Image (cartoon, rainbow, N blue to C red):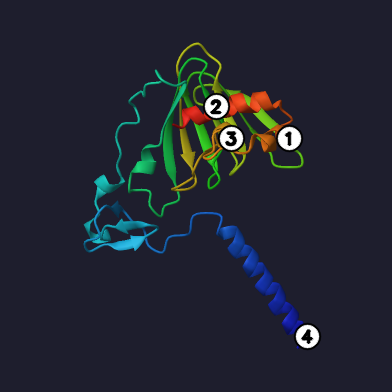
Amino acid sequence: MKGVLNYLVIASTLMALACSVASAFDPAPLQDFCVAVNTSTDAVFVNGKFCKDPKLANANDFFFQGLNIPRSTANRSTRVERHAFECGQNNTLSVSLARIDFAPYGLNPPHIHPHATEIFTVIKGTLYVGFVTSNPDNRLFTTALNAGDVFVFPISLINFQFNVGNTDALAFSSLSSQNPERITIADTVFGSNPLINPDVLTKALQLNKNVVNYLQKQFSSKST
């Protein structure tokens, strides 16, 4: 009897751990697909979206055009276009896609995707990329990528991409979530609403309070 109880305890613990790990990722769909629609007429509600009747789906529901069109970087050094984020095709499929245009020496600043691993493919230009592991090691992995090169950014780790050339660069980002989210470190720390108490940042980052005030002014103005 004791052995059975021990087995049940172990099994329950493993199941709880499995559920806690699984909850960090997109749930597995229980149907082939769920093409999201904007109306609730004769539709099923899944993942916060209304789904088209699968019998009415067609090839156009899984088709997207426009990734070949350059995006303007006139007002910023990097332009991230989350094309597939805006489409209903990826609902329940745990994937998304972004086009990233870099101006000369443009930077996609340090950020994380808390819900997704990212496969980063360079189409044009030379990009210096990297990510940092979690505590306690905080190891930095970096490399230079050229057209045709691919790099993987593990889920929820701080990563960045920097165009080291004097010409435009282009990359595509494939992510393992329909909603990977994006948290830009500097914007979050210095541009929160309301702002974090400067005394907290002064002590945490070992910065002069005047520097903290200056950075908060810069990043809070970006978000307005």
* Label annotation for residue 29: none
| Residue 46 position within the rendered picture, expressed as x and y whole percent measured from the top left | 37, 60
First in residue order: circle 4 vs circle 3: 4
The span from disc 3 to disc 2 (Cα, nearest Å) is: 16 Å
| Residue 183 position within the rendered picture, expressed as x and y whole percent measured from the top left | 54, 39
Q: Name the residue type under label 2.
A: Lys
Q: Name the residue type under label 1.
A: Lys
* Label annotation for residue 185: 3
Please give the name of the residue rendered at 49% of the width and 46% of the height, measured from the top-left corner: 176
Q: Nearer the viewer, mark 4 or mark 3?
A: 3
The span from disc 2 to disc 4 (Cα, nearest Å) is: 64 Å
First in residue order: circle 2 vs circle 4: 4
The span from disc 1 to disc 4 (Cα, nearest Å) is: 53 Å
Q: Nearer the viewer, mark 2 or mark 4?
A: 2
- Front residue of this view, candidates 210 and 67: 210
What residue does disc 2 label? Answer: 217
First in residue order: circle 1 vs circle 3: 3
The span from disc 1 to disc 3 (Cα, nearest Å) is: 17 Å
**Label 4: which secondary element:** helix
Q: Name the residue type under label 4.
A: Lys
Within 10 Å of the Cα at label 1, are there few (<14), some (14-19), or many (20+) other Cα atoms? few
**Label 1: which secondary element:** helix
Within 10 Å of the Cα at label 3, are there few (<14), some (14-19), or many (20+) other Cα atoms? some
- Of the 4 image quadrants, the one containing the C terminus is top left
What residue does disc 1 label? Answer: 203
Q: Name the residue type under label 3.
A: Ile
Q: Is residue 139 visible?
A: no
Within 10 Å of the Cα at label 4, are there few (<14), some (14-19), or many (20+) other Cα atoms? few
